[in-house]
Image (spheres, rainbow, N blue to C red):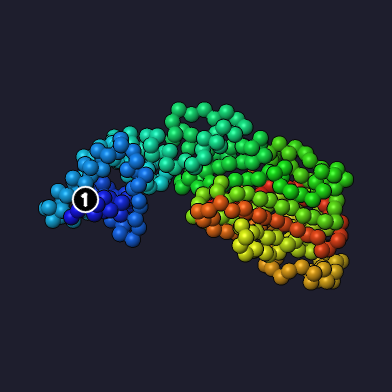
Amino acid sequence: MKRTGLRKDICNFIAPSFVFCEPSFYSFSWKFRYNQQIPIGKVQQSNSFAFGFDSLIGLLQKNRKKKKKMECLDMNVLPESCVAVILSLTSPADACKSSLVSSTFQSASESDSVWERFLPSDYGEIVSKASDNLEFSSKKELYLLLCNPVLVADGKMSFKLERSTGRISYILSARELSITWSNDPMYWVWKSIPESRFAEVAELKTVSWLEIHGKIRSKTLTPNTRYGAYLLLKITDRAFGLDLIPSEISLEVGNGAKFTNTAYLRSQDSKKQRMEDLFYGNRKQMLKSRVIEGEDRVLSEREDGWMEIELGEFFNGEGDKAVKMSLMEVKGHQLKGGLIVEGIELRPKS
């Protein structure tokens, strides 16, 4: 077997399922995955890992000569640098689990070379733009810090990593959105409330034209990941006119197809809802005919006390495109108020 073939074998069995082999706790089983290739071009750029891969190649050659299946390999014989390369090609969750295998794995799972692979490529810029000073002594500490929401961009955006995968989430604050007439105190008021992660939220006083737009570049998100966009809001006790007609929601990536749907900004007061249906039922049906057909999505409650409504979803590929999201209710012409907007969240879907 040629050396290049062995390197291919190494790449093919990376991304392991961790299985302890009896009777030794420190034995480690790596399963071949011929249906998935992981290139090692980036690994080969680092001279510090060359010895580790050469050692592993030697072990593979030895096993092949003995005509044994590589079903179980004592990973304690591998140098720490080689183990670090292997772990960097798995996931944060797997790297943490591997620390239980042996002292070599524990040391490798703490190394900066592993955790730098799990950080976003622009993590330096994120740290420099953080509103609060982030203190850390290792890349793993930084990763764990970024798994909690971090305010960036002068406090107008919130950044967070998904702990188990390292996938990126962003929340654009209301100040980062385009809200029609939001600078006119007759229609909107900017205020601070303790429930918000941002310094200000936008509260609708009264308006007949409701239009909210958000935009983000796709390169700031995790590539090859499906995302959902969610408007974060609250409905006050004094709310009126918000659910007389469904709002039109949309999401568009680059110059591609535009996703459209409908959603109701419904009050949570069921008694009030029944009264409105009784008195305005006929008018609601008439107004609804003016908007596009859709699913009539409704609000859902979040763990942080806010409500959210999904504006749409998209698959984020490798390129850099503008992701545009919106909610509009401009066809009913009735006055409406009592809406508090915190922002729009973009997060990976399960």
Image quarter of residue 112: top left
Q: Give the residue at mark 1.
A: 3
Tell how many labels.
1
Question: Image check: 320 left or right of 299?
Answer: left
Residue 3 spot, x, y in % from top left: 21, 50
In the picture shown, does residue 73 fall above or below 32?
Answer: above
Residue at figure coordinates x 28%, y 53% from the top left: 8
Pick out the residue farthest to the left: 66
Residue 9 spot, x, y in % from top left: 26, 53
Which type of secondary structure does the marked residue at label 1 adopt?
Answer: helix
Tell which of 75 and 273 is nearer to you: 75
Residue 315 spot, x, y in % from top left: 54, 58
Residue type at numbered disc 1: Arg
Residue at figure coordinates x 83%, y 56% from the top left: 209
Residue 16 spot, x, y in % from top left: 33, 51
Residue at figure coordinates x 31%, y 57% from the top left: 33
